[in-house]
Image (tube, helix red, strand yellow):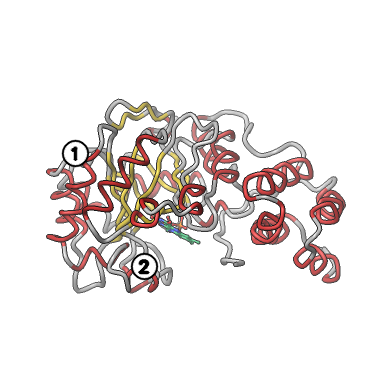
């Protein structure tokens, strides 16, 4: 038993344990979050939703923030203008968000080029206008996810976290890399502690966590209250729940007993969520990750058929073939983006 298995409160929201699934654009859609939640993740967070697009009725933005039957729903917003952040937060709250999270960590040029995501860490006064607008717009708790800073010469996560909490933010997540590192090197778990020292609201540590031992170590080194897991969950959406089980000393109930049924259910969940045409394409990266993680000897011709077929029935048949009798492998490595 470690603190990672204890419940946590964010405002009025009860969080059942402290091992969370990270928001991942193009990955943590509703079908994936549902899998992670059912396996016992303490919290799951939507893909980032662009605030201006959401306000301008983009159907894709709505889809990214669907709640489905999730018990606790966190919608992450990205943006660069206070007005749109406030308006988008109101929409998210009206659509059932229990928590609104703000993204100040995304390093993608498409996002930072628009002065949102981690680019906001270069101008904290401006970042604060977005935070204040979001906090003032909604009654639900607002949380914030960030990196350590823009680069190693500008580590300002502690200052941003302190100012955000003063403005009313109720939980801070820190990915232990700078924006300029993108995903290179190793996340600096010790550096997150500087944020711990200036805030008393829950702190979530993130970056390169893939096992129960990692969870214990990052919490100990950073002083964080909880942990967020991203890429290590590729091909094993149950990972956060499995780690929470392990830390509780429970028999592992999170990993699927039958991988073939599990992958097929995830696949059909994606087809239902996106519609068949988009779903077939969107599912490919997940199917690639399942294969990479759990199978060793799938012939290239079969892989190719799986990754190129536009026929959902054909793909289902191949999947049943590949995964029947295969036992899930618990791995702690972060797989590369297949997309
Ligand atoms: C494909 C991908 C998409 C991501 N999308 C988001 C996002 O929408 N919002 C966000 O705050 N972070 C996003 N991240 C960052 C992750 O939440 C996390 O901070 C990062 O991957 C480090 O954690 P990890 O080492 O456990 O993967 C994304 C990361 C990846 C790999």
178 vs 255, left or right, is left
Question: Disc 2 beta carbon < 8 A from ligand 1?
Answer: no
Q: Is residue 190 left or right of residue 110?
A: left
The disc placed on residue 33 is none
In the image shown, does 214 or 183 lie closer to the viewer? 183
Q: Is mark 1 within 8 Å of ligand 1?
A: no
Task: Give the percent coordinates (x, y) of residue 182.
Answer: 39, 70
Tags 2 and 1 in contact by the CB under 8 Å rule? no
Q: What residue is shown with label 2?
A: 111
Would you name the residue on which mark 1 appears? 200
Query: Looking at the image, in which quadrant does ligand 1 appear?
Result: bottom left
Q: Using the image as rendered, state which of residue 274 and residue 141 is in the foreground.
A: 274
Quadrant in the picture for the N terminus: top left
Mark 2 or mark 1: whose residue is earlier in sequence: 2
Q: Position of residue 31 (x, y in %)?
A: 60, 44
Residue 265, picture quadrant: top right
Which residue is at 27% across, 54% downward? 192
- Which mark lies nearer to you, 2 or 1? 2
Look at the picture and state if 294 lies above or below 152: above
**What residue is rendered at 26% in x and 72% in y?**
151
Q: What is the crowding at mark 1: few (fewer than 14 residues within 10 Å), some, or many (at least 20)? A: few
Residue 289 sits above or below residue 132 on the image: below
In-image side of 235 versus 230 (left or right) = right
Q: Quadrant of the C terminus?
A: bottom right
**SS at circle 1:** loop
Residue 145 at x, y = what percent? Answer: 31, 52
Q: Calculate the distance from the C-alpha at mark 2 to the C-alpha at mark 1.
A: 30 Å
191 or 338, which is in the foreground? Answer: 338
Q: Judge the density around disc 2: few (<14), some (14-19), many (≥20) Cα neighbours within 10 Å.
A: some
């Amino acid at each position: 038993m470690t603190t990672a298995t204890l419940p946590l409160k964010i405002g009025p929201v009860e969080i059942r344990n402290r091992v969370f699934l990270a928001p991942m654009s193009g990955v943590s859609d509703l079908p994936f979050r549902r899998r992670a939640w059912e396996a016992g993740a303490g919290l799951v967070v939507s893909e980032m939703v662009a605030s201006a697009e959401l306000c301008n009725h983009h159907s894709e933005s709505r889809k990214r923030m669907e709640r489905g039957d999730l018990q606790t729903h966190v919608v992450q917003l990205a943006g660069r203008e206070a007005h749109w952040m406030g308006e988008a937060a109101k929409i998210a709250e009206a659509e059932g968000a229990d928590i609104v999270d703000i993204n100040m960590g995304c390093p993608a040029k498409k996002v930072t080029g628009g002065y949102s995501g981690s680019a906001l860490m270069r101008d904290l006064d401006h970042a604060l206008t977005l935070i204040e607008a979001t906090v003032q717009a909604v009654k639900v708790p607002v949380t914030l996810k960030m990196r350590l800073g823009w680069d190693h010469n500008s580590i300002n996560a502690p200052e941003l976290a302190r100012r955000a909490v003063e403005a009313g933010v109720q939980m801070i997540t820190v990915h232990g890399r700078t924006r300029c590192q993108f995903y290179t090197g190793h996340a600096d778990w010790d550096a997150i502690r500087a944020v711990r020292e200036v805030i008393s609201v829950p702190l979530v540590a993130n970056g390169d966590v893939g096992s129960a031992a990692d969870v214990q170590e990052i919490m100990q080194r950073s002083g964080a209250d909880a942990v967020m897991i991203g890429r290590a969950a590729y091909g094993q959406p149950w990972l956060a729940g499995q780690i929470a089980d392990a830390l509780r000393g429970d028999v592992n109930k999170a990993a699927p007993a039958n991988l073939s049924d599990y992958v097929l259910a995830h696949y059909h969940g994606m087809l239902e969520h996106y519609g068949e045409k988009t779903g077939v394409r969107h599912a490919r990266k997940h199917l690639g990750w399942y294969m990479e993680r759990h199978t060793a000897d799938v012939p290239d011709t079969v892989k190719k058929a799986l990754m190129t077929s536009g026929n959902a029935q054909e793909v289902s048949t191949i999947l049943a073939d590949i995964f029947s009798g295969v036992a899930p492998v618990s791995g702690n490595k972060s797989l590369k983006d297949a997309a």
